[in-house]
Amino acid sequence: MAIESDGAVNHQPEFTAACITPSADQAVFDAALAMAWTTVDAATNPALRDRLLGGGDDPRARRPRGAPRPGPAFEAAFAEAKYIIAASPGCQGVRLEHCVEAADRYLLLVEWESLQAHTGGFRDSPAYGQWRALLHHFYDPFPVVEHFEAVDSA
């Protein structure tokens, strides 16, 4: 799937603007349709389905399994990295949580004073290079990064 973004990449305001255009909507629709037809093919073709589910002889076609839990090495790297992000202007708190049901999943919650503090402050700072060096090699695939605003709490 490709979105016409004139060279802008994820987490840049220009990319965000490109994602709310009619051509971006069409790209998402086209990609979703392609995935749907691929699912139909896999569901209706026994040989393909068997190969994708790991019954075939081609190891490249087997269903991927969850990566082993990064565990102590990841948690130790985060124990160091948390001070880097916490010291960044606009960071109001950082917390790492481990999923109880899925041993290979974590949730990182970072509270920012503003979106700009993250995307234009921390992401453009030398501190981000240190953060990346400590943690990014653990990511497979790279995690989804989303920004939220509080609506309600108790």
Image (spheres, helix red, strand yellow):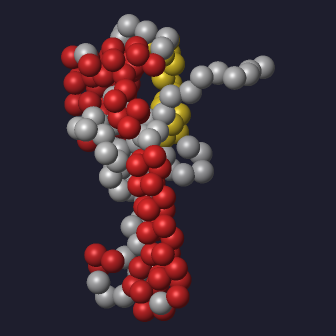
Residue appearing at x 51%, y 70% in the figure: 36
Q: Position of residue 51 (x, y in %)?
A: 39, 85
The one nearer the camera, 38 or 23, is 23
Q: Quadrant of residue 91?
A: top left
The one nearer the camera, 31 or 142, is 31
Q: Is residue 1 above or below residue 52?
A: above
Q: Is residue 21 above or below residue 132?
A: below
Q: Is residue 150 visible?
A: yes
Q: Is residue 83 visible?
A: no
Residue appearing at x 22%, y 31% in the figure: 133
Number of marks in picture: 0
Q: Quadrant of residue 78?
A: top left
Residue appearing at x 54%, y 52% in the figure: 102
Quadrant where the C terminus sits is top right
Q: Position of residue 30 (x, y in %)?
A: 44, 62
Q: Position of residue 10 (x, y in %)?
A: 34, 36
Residue appearing at x 41%, y 79% in the figure: 52
Q: Quadrant of residue 134?
A: top left
The one nearer the camera, 152 or 98, is 152
The one nearer the camera, 59 or 74, is 59
Q: Position of residue 5 (x, y in %)?
A: 30, 40
Q: Residue furthest front?
A: 22
Horizontally, residue 136 falls left or right of residue 17, namely left
Horizontally, residue 44 falls left or right of residue 12, namely right
Quadrant where the N terminus sits is bottom left
Q: Is residue 135 above or below residue 85?
A: below
Horizontally, residue 106 falls left or right of residue 142, namely right
